[in-house]
Amino acid sequence: VQLQASGGGLVQPGESLRLSCTPSGLTLDYYAIGWFRQAPGKEREGVSCIGMSDDNTRYVDSVKGRFTISRANRKNAVYLQKNNLRPEDTAVYYCAADYRGQCTHAFTAEGEYDYWGQGTLVTVSS
């Protein structure tokens, strides 16, 4: 089982990007999907999560109102729409899958997730 995060790139502050998380070897419908990021010199941190139900979503405070997580089950993909990007959003972004299917208060804990993928680099710079 592998997850692949894609869609990263270099953008200017205030611009937008949409990241995609696509798996091989599993169907995302039954998993909660979390997005994490690791900025240079910092530990990896949880950013957002979506459960099996589209109304089960969570965000850390630093991205609320700017990032939106969604799933497209027909495409077996989960997206992270990132608007109004800031330099502090610069990081490698990863997606991860939790077989229990629910985003709880512990959604930022790496141990909640069973599968991880390769990251995609997002650089926000003028």
Image (tube, helix red, strand yellow):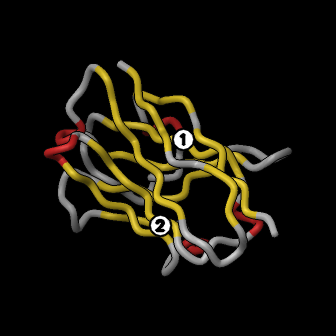
Residue 103 horizontal side relative to residue 89, left or right? left
Q: Which mark is residue 59?
A: 2
Residue 110 horizontal side relative to residue 103, left or right? right
Residue drawn 68% across the image and 63% down it: 11
- Secondary structure category for the residue under label 1: strand
Q: Quadrant of residue 13?
A: bottom right
Give percent across and percent down for residue 50. 32, 56
Q: Earlier in the sequence, mark 2 or mark 1?
A: 2
Amino acid type, callout 2: Tyr
- Secondary structure category for the residue under label 2: strand
Amino acid type, callout 1: Tyr
Q: For the residues carrying marks 2 and 1, which lies nearer the camera in this image?
A: 1
What whole-number distance in Å separates the C-alpha atoms at marks 2 and 1? 15 Å
Residue drawn 33% across the image and 49% down it: 78
Q: Is residue 4 above or below residue 124?
A: above
Per the image, the residue denoted by label 1 is 94
Farthest residue, direction left:
74
Residue drawn 76% across the image and 67% down it: 87
